[in-house]
């Protein structure tokens, strides 16, 4: 009795992601190529379909510039998103960027795009670069009262990291697009996409939590219900 | 430069509270009369104006039944909400209700109303009854994937309590309605409404955080962005 | 390259669960029938196979006594465990048991069984009875320096609850026994075992975290590395 | 009945800030000019009046050196405090100072001043430089068992940051001095002092929490009740 | 070099506990006899010597009424404190007291004594009764802005419990009085006082943290620096 | 009755540290010389005696290279461990090492040694370098599912730091070896070993928590019970 009810509630509500961000800009910021796709690829594909402008900003590419840039470009196309590479003149490690430089780049992006929502890494990550990007995004909040969300820890090789989502996005209709976007990162996930399957498992389990087939969970940093 | 920008962003977005809950039911649950008004009176008045059905559920009245019932009724009218008193046959302390009885009452309400959102006390409260109601509401989540929010600690005499909101509602247009609803609780806030003014101060300070004149902050337990 | 390495590491180590608890007693305490099976059925089946004495203690049966008692008995047999029902003379709600009575029952059990490890609910649960049992178990720690673990939140209908495991048990060889034990609770999970599948999904995802096919995660309250 | 009581309790006790720090040195450390004034300007003005030696240490000035140095000097005079600028030979970003250099500067200051109390940023800040200064101060604790307090997050443009004070200072008599000291930072708060008013609002709301007109809240890192 | 410095700082400051609470009332609330002595016996002995009125309130005696009452009386005398037994007409378990009854008793005490400080159990305790008393004390804060401190978990048989003090009291001069007060609880700690020695060890280790021979650590719930 | 029981339980179990890590490699990583000895010297001495290969990795020596290297070498010999100095060509501050370089060094070590367990600083430390090493070790978890433990904050001059152990190691038989290893750091702890005694006090208090004479407490990041 409960399951059909839940499903119906979700359908009724599925108008609202479109009504909230449709015709507006959503900015997803990841430390490196593939981070954003792994965490919220399904959500971005939905937003794009529902007429939001979605920009994926990748801070830098640490190694293998040409290949990874091309993969990121291909993945963004699959999701229907624009790609911005913040450090675009060759390989760069985030450790080699000063924090105020990183904040400066992100500030410029926020000033240009005027996003209705910004999504990035959370403070709970096993990779220091991800935490660094999270912290720099925290600062950009002073520019504009956009919705600010944090996504699930991302990794190529699994490590248990504490993360608890508070908001859930139904990605049943876009899970295959997400998986395709992940697999576009051939240099990371190979032809068989073995580790990538972890993200399908996670989406299925997350979906069960809210009564849909696949979902992505995000944490809420700041949200405007106006 | 920033302030006008923020204001504009908010206006553009002010469609979305209506589009999210308009024509649907929102259920606000407080331990005692006045709790809901103090915490989210401005939000409820907005929801009511924007065509949501808003139900205020008060668990019980500990003392002075007739007076406080009448005050609660009057406050609900001011906000444009329906009042439900869960223990409606006389004074009752929440300590004297078994937890499974409380969960049973709340379950029945959720089953009847099929709310799109439930708002209640958070786990961070100085009053045990408020925590008890929070915990009982936690259980009702299993019935339906409604949005689940927690509101600011409420009290007649101020005590510092840790609480950090994640979502913000612009209540600039309804702050006076909220203050009137609080003052309807004459037996608690007297004619001069001295302590009640604390809630106006809080709304002003919260508003500054997101670039509007008055706002209420709520925490997000679970939210469906579908 | 990493995956085979991980697998080998686990095999080498799989001696140690047996060497730690083999020939000794492990006590798993759940509020109601099915809790223990859902959370750590695979681990208990392994311990039983590896010559530990495993006792499942169920505090009480809230409704439908005969049926649920028989189901619990059947599930324990499937896992190779002994069942103890603490309130065994009919239906009882944990809310109707005083905390000191519950501590008294658990103390008696610990004194009798002298367990090398006790596993129970964590403090992070959406069901109050589970938290109550957790808190009562906290007290029993004063009797004996047993290993004290907390297991994953359990529920028939999914609700997102924050929980982060610190210890992982490979249950690849016993996942089917676990699923059979869950399904023995026919009155809860029906013939199709739909919600029960959530626990297989969770075990698969948890397994990925540590490089095995299926795993269960538990939190560590206190552990003796002697 | 409660309000007069509270007020009286406070008066009786208002001897004790003087008796605790009078004739001794209090050191307030901020990342940049204006931080200390925004957070604890009222407390410092009181300490200065009550015969403590109060030193405001500003780590560095990121831009516009001459102007901001002069503003900081003027603000310190208004509060009756001494100003120390740690990097005093031109603009410098804290990101460009090594952590051990920062700890070295703070250690030297603590060794010279032998403060009875040190106040600085908390770990909960949206600005990375503030967190960096907090962490460096943490290290100076090993030199001397001074009282160690953390103050409210400071910012020119409001961002919601989690912070919960545990100690409260009545600043009713010095709130105007504080506001004047903030406004001395003309380059930051302009002639109309709009955002600065946020700090008066915060002091009023904090004051309500402890029964006085205006108060500042600080968190306690370490305190000696001897 | 550091050690003598620290010691001197402490002496200079040791005026201030007296100046803060001397001639005023301090109320220490424990669930059962011996709790207060174990946690803050040294601090209470100092306050009493330094001319504060110190009242030890024990909520109830669960078993062995006459013996434990006499022991509590004797311990209070050793510390120079007054004893109040809240449930004084025979054995009573805190589980059998309604929360509003407990709050009522504590409110009455606070109204009568008008304490400058209240000390009680923290939220971090392995014994439920201790947590219950903590929660009831939280509510009494609304009556008066007294200093509110939480003390170290107390127990006869050791269990590791998370607790982090923020304030430290030098009890070098009163440690033997404290140990004598603990040993007055003969029915709990026997003639050899074996477990009681744990509290001397804890005081020595705590003392090292702040440069004195023996100290007690307490957490700060709310403090007025006025 | 309880004490002998506890002791017996521990003896029965003291087989298992050997059975878990005997014949395998344990890697202990400290920021500077003496950190590992202070925190887990007793545990490492036991592991070494029980036929584990124990490697102590010191990231760098900040000052006085030759002396401190020799002291570290001597301390490792006393504990029966191998010493690896990661930056071995002279003094280096961890602040001057890029995070990816540090992760690179630790990755290489983990790849070479294939440890069954890694022990390092926790996230709760007053010294930034210790936190930096903790964070870099977090990343190495992706290479192999080793047991991952965090040890007690270490310092030469005491500062209170929040830390709560979850696992306990009986070091009654090796406490004197530990103290000797600490004292081998003559340049830090002098001939009288005054501050070093703090660590004996801590071990005694920790031991009381689990019913043995001396114990070391560690926190569990990730553990495989297979």
Image: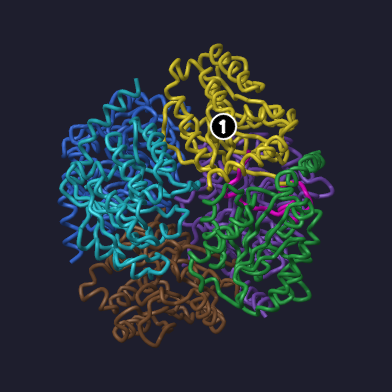
Chain colours: A yellow, B green, C cyan, D purple, E brown, F blue
Does residue B215 show up magenta in the picture?
yes
x and y percentages locating residue C198 in the rendered image: 43, 40
The residue that disc 1 covers is A172
Placement of B166 over or under E25, stated as above or below? above
Q: Is residue E22 left or right of residue F56?
A: right
Placement of A10 over or under E24, stated as above or below? above
Q: Which residue in the rendered view is the most extreme toward the right?
A: D191
Q: Is residue D75 left or right of residue B131?
A: right
x and y percentages locating residue E225 in the rendered image: 59, 66
Give the residues drawn in magenta, as a range: B204-226
Q: Is residue B163 left or right of residue B195?
A: left
Nearest the eye: C211 or A101: C211
Q: Is residue D181 visible?
A: no
Q: Is residue D110 visible?
A: yes
Which residue is pictured at 50% across the width and 78% down the height? Answer: E101
Which residue is pictured at 31% across the width and 80% down the height? Answer: E63
Which residue is pictured at 53% across the width and 32% down the height? Answer: A130
Nearest the eye: E179 or A10: A10
Callout 1 secondary element: loop
Placement of D83 over or under B188, stated as above or below? above
Which residue is pictured at 53% across the width and 79% down the height? Answer: E104
Nearest the eye: C137 or E140: C137
Does residue F198 show up magenta in the picture?
no
x and y percentages locating residue D204 in the rendered image: 72, 62
Q: Which residue in the rendered view is the most extreme toward the top?
A: A66
| Residue D159, picture quadrant | top right
Chain of the residue that carries numbered disc 1 in the rendered image: A
Q: Report how many numbered discs are placed on residues in the image.
A: 1
């Amino acid at each position: 009795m409960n399951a059909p009810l839940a499903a119906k509630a979700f359908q009724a509500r599925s108008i609202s992601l479109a009504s909230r961000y449709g015709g507006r800009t959503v900015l997803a910021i990841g430390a490196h190529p593939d981070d954003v796709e792994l965490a919220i690829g399904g959500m971005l594909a939905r937003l794009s379909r529902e007429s939001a402008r979605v920009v994926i900003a990748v801070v830098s590419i640490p190694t293998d510039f040409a290949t990874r840039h091309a993969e990121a470009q291909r993945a963004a196309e699959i999701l229907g998103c624009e790609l911005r590479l913040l450090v675009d003149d060759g390989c760069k490690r985030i450790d080699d960027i000063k924090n105020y430089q990183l904040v400066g780049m992100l500030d410029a992006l926020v000033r240009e795009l005027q996003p209705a929502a910004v999504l990035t890494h959370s403070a709970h990550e096993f990779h220091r670069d991800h935490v660094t990007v999270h912290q720099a995004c925290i600062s950009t909040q002073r520019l504009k009262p956009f919705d600010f969300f944090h996504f699930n820890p991302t990794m190529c090789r699994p490590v248990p990291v504490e993360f608890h989502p508070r908001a859930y996005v139904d990605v049943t209709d876009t899970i295959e697009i997400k998986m395709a976007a992940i697999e576009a990162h051939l240099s990371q996930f190979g032809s068989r996409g073995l580790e990538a399957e972890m993200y399908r498992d996670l989406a299925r389990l997350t979906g069960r939590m809210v009564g849909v087939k696949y979902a992505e969970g995000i944490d809420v940093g700041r949200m405007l219900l106006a």
